[in-house]
Amino acid sequence: MTNALEIEGLTKTYGSGFEALKGIDLHVAQGDFFALLGPNGAGKSTTLGIVCSLVTKTAGKVKVFGYDIDTHLSDAKLHLGVVPQEFNFNQFEKVFDIVTIQAGYYGIPLKKAAVSAEKYLKKLGLWDKRNTPARMLSGGMKRRLMIARALVHEPRLLILDEPTAGVDIELRRSMWAFLEEMNRQGTTIILTTHYLEEAEALCRNIAIIDHGRIIRNTSKRELLQQLSLETFLLDAETALDNVPELDGFSCRLDDEGVLEVDVHKGQALNDVFMQLEHQGIRVVSMRTKANRLEELFIRMVEHNAPAAEGITEGRT
Amino acid sequence: MNAQALFTAYSTIVLREIRRFTRIWPQTLLPPAVTMTLYFIIFGNLIGSRIGDMGGFDYMSFIVPGLIMMAVITSSYANVVSSFFSMKFQRSVEELLVSPVPNWVILAGYVTGGMARGLGIGVIVTLLSLAFTRLQIHNLPMVVVTVFLTSALFAVGGFINALLATKFDDVSIVPTFILTPLTYLGGVFYSIDLLPDFWQGVSMVNPILYMVNGFRFGILGVSDVNPFVSLGMILAFIAVLTFIALKLLARGKGIRH
C-alpha cells in the first residue's frame, strides 16, 4: 500500500545559510497516528512546512499518497489538511465563512461546503459561534476552528503542528478524543507536540528530530521498552514515617511522605507490593513519577546534542 | 483541479474580496467619492470657470474623464495591495498556499477583486460628475475597454507591490511617491499641448498619460496621443506585469520561506 507520506533526503538551507534540515528520511503509513517530536528549532515545523508547501525545500523528495510535490503538487495538496501552530485565519471573518472559503479554495461549491462546515463545526463545538468574527473567539475555540477548516475538504492526511498549545486540560482531552475518532475513521494523522504525554496517549509511531536530523524513528511501544528504569510513586493508607526496606529496590520518601520506588527493567512490581504487605503497609494508589516518553526524549536529545553540534561545526 | 473546481476557487477569492471592501465601505468606497466631489467643486467649478476651455471643451468636461480614471487607478491598486498584504501580515495567505489553487487563479481572483472595487468607484465618480457636467460618450467601446484594462493593470501592479512589501510602509510608498505623481502629471488636469516641447517629451514616457488620454478620447473624442497606441501600451504593461507577478508567485517571493 502507498504510504501516506514519504520523505527522502529532504534538506532545507535558509537564505541566512542556516541548515534547518540535513537529509531527512521519513515514511508514514496510511492510517497511522504519527508524532514528530523534537526540541525547539529542531526542524519539525520546517519539515511539515515543506510538505504543506509553505516552505520551499532545498533538495529531496516528498510524496503525499504517492503524489510527488514536484510534479503533482495539486494532487498532493488535495489529500492534505493542515493545522498550523500559529493562528493564520482572517481575524475579521466569521467562523462559518472561514471554513467555507477554505472549502472554496479546494474547488468545493458553497452548498456542499456548507454541509461539511456544519458537520465539523458541530463536532468541534463551534456551531453556536458560526456567525462570530474569529477575533472574538477564545484561544481554544480558535484552535478548534483551525481543525474544522483543515477538515472541511475531507483530507486523507491531517497534519497538526502543536494543535493543543495553550489549551486547557479538559479541552485538550476532548480534542484528543476527536482526533482519535478521525484516525479510527481512516484519516492518517501526523502531529508535532511539546506535550509528550499527548504523543504517548495518541500516537502509534514516533520520530524524534534534532538539529535537522531524524535521530529515532520507531513505534511508541519499542521506544518505551528502551526505558531501563521507571520511578513509581506509591501512596500508603497511613502516612509513612520511615523508609521501608525493599530487597532489590531502591526507595525513598518524598517531602509529603509518598514512597518513591525505582523499578529496573525485568523487575516485577508484584515483588514491591508483596514486600510492602509483609511490612503491613497497604498501598492505596500508584502513579509513575515522570512521563515515560518525556524521560526518553530528554535522554535522546541530550545524548544527540554534542554529536550534532560537532557535525555542524565540522561543516561550517 | 478540473475547470469547474478552478472556477469555484476563483469565484471564492473574488467574492471574498468584494465582501471585504463592501464590509469596510467607509474606508474603501466613501473616501474617493468625497475626494472627487471636492475636485469637481474646487478645480472644476471654482477654478475651472476662470481657466476657460481646454482641448475644445470647458475645463470641467475636460477633467472629468481624468478624475474618473484617477479614482479607478488608485482604487484598483489600493484594493489588491492592502488586501493581499494584510493576508500576508495575518498569515491567512497560508490558507491559499496549502490549497491546490494554481498561482494564475490566485492572481486572477485578486485582480478581479481589485477591478470590482476600481470599476465600482469609477461608476460612483461618474454618477457624481453628472451633478456638475453633462457627460457625453464619444466612443463607448473605447471607454469600456480602456477603463477595464487600466483597472486590471493597476490591480496587477498592486499585487506585485503586496508580494514585495515586507512592512506597512512598503504598501504606501508606491502609491504616494510613484502612482500619485504620475497620475497628476499624466494629463488629468491639463493637456500636454500646454507644456514646452521638452516636458511634452518627458510626459510621453508616463504610462498613465496613455490611459487618461485613451479614456478621454472615448468620452470627449480628444486625446494628446493616438488612442490605439494607448491601448497597445496598456496591453503591453499588463503582459509584462502579469509575467512578473506569476514569476514572483512561482518563486514564493514574500509568501514562502
Image: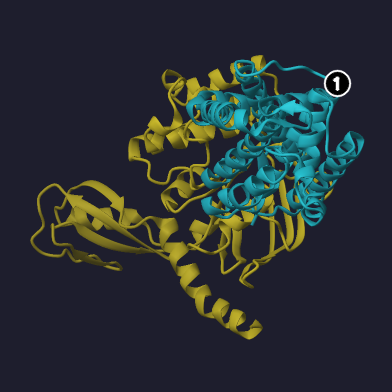
Q: Which residue is mark 1?
A: B139
- What colouring does the structure picture have? by chain
Residue at x 82% of width, y 45% of height: B237
Q: Nearer the viewer, residue B12 or B1?
A: B12
| Nearest to the observer: residue B249 or residue A115 | B249
Q: Quadrant of residue A274?
A: bottom left
Choose between B167 and B50: the one closer to the eye.
B50
The hue used for chain B is cyan
Chain letter, yellow = A
Q: Amino acid at mark 1?
A: Asn
In this rendering, would B138 be left or right of A239? right
What residue is drawn where x is 14% and y is 53%? Answer: A280
Does any portion of residue A106 appear in the rendered image?
no
Give the percent coordinates (x, y) of residue B77.
Answer: 66, 39
Q: Residue B17: x percent and y percent? A: 62, 29
Q: Who's the residue at 80% across and 24% down the image? A: B220
In the rendered image, the vertical position of residue A81 relative to residue A97, given as above or below: below
User: Which residue appears at 73% of the width and 63% of the height?
Assistant: A58
Extreme-bottom residue of the structure: A314
Q: Chain of mark 1?
A: B
Evaluate whether residue B175 shows in this view.
yes
Q: Quadrant of the C terminus of chain A?
A: bottom right
- Horizontally, is B148 left or right of A44 in the view? right
Horizontal arrangement in the rendering, residue A196 relative to residue A223 (left or right): left
| Residues packed near mark 1 inside 10 Å, few (<14), some (14 to 19) or many (20 plus) | some
Where residue B186 appears, as percent x and y from the top left, is: 73, 43
**Secondary structure type for disc 1:** loop
The N terminus of chain A - image quarter: top right
Query: Horizontally, is B23 left or right of A229 in the view?
Result: right
Give coordinates of residue B227: x percent, y percent.
Answer: 88, 34
Q: How many marks?
A: 1
Image height check: is B204 above or below A249? Answer: above
